Amino acid sequence: MGWASGEAISALTKFVLEQGYGCTVTLVPTDTVPAVTSLAENGQPDVVPEIWSNSAPAYNGLVDEGKVVTAGNTFANGGEEGWWIPQYLADAHPELMTLEGILANPELVDSRFHNCPVGWGCRIVNDNLKVVHDMEGKGIEVFDHGSGANLAASIAAAFEDKAPWFGYYWGPTAVLGKYPMVRVDIGDVDAAQHALNQVEGQDPAKLGVSGFPSAPVLTAMTADFAARAPEAAEFLRNASLPNPLVSQMLAWKDENNASADETAAWLLTNHTDVVMGMVSADAKAKLSKLF
């Protein structure tokens, strides 16, 4: 996939399949929709790590038809969205780990919520939730950022001064890897209610409390590959990375302007036990000789 985590995870997968399982691997640059279209029309590529299935409606149909097998979750916790505060703020004021605590103490978060830019799907949800929770009526100014870069910069500036910060972000990302954040409890996830909250201009009477559900982020393989290479397929079924580790990996990649291969090497070198926990005994023996 044509983004940082997708490139690094593909490089890691390639290395393990080649060095641990004796596969010959070719990396094919792609993106979500082209990859799923190719799976449907050509039965290729054999493996696609990091499919965000909520962005590829055709994917579930391919699974139902038996053309594609979901090996597992690329990210252990899926794609995460939510409202966050810095770890140092949560340590100083544990009551801020719930939205109820924030609304009771708006001054502790500088009376501000950092919102998504216009045009982002999260902006619609946040704008609806601010009505549900009467945030402005309870003393929280909703500050709308003009871009994702500005939103990230606001987090960096807060950490530099150990200042209050409260707002929306998502992961795994380099930002969450670099800046320790705590997700605020804004209510249990209600999938039906969240769907209603995603509608722009929604009737206020239909809005309600819900947290953000995690987005499925999957490793897919063709049914043909699963049958043809069962040992490699078993590795893919185990190849799930903890979200905080993915964020750390992305932060390291960003800070070092590293390539996908260099980032995979960092993961293999610094978190060898995680990778070794995914592979067979035979593959582990082969890979162990390389470290």
Image (tube, rainbow, N blue to C red):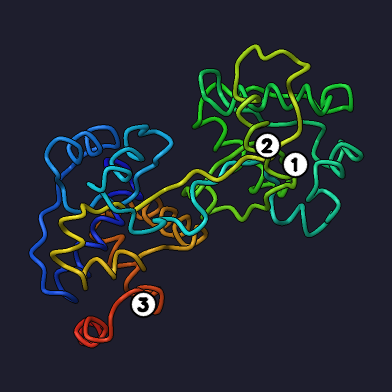
At x 58%, y 41%, the residue is 81
What residue type is disc 3 on?
Thr
Q: From the viewer's perspective, is the residue at label 3 or at label 1 nearer?
A: 1
Say which label, 2 or 3, has the lower sequence index: 2
At x 80%, y 40%, the residue is 109
Residue 186: numbered disc: 1
Of residues 123 and 247, the one nearer the viewer is: 123
Q: From the viewer's perspective, is the residue at label 1 or at label 2 nearer?
A: 1
Quarter occupied by the C terminus: bottom left
Residue 272: numbered disc: 3
Mark 1 touching mark 2, by CB under 8 A?
Answer: no
Q: In the image, is residue 85 above or below residue 115?
A: below
Disc 3 and disc 1: Cα gap in Å?
36 Å
Residue 26 % position (x, y)? 10, 55
What residue type is disc 2 on?
Gly
At x 14%, y 35%, the residue is 41
Name the residue beneath numbered marker 2: 167
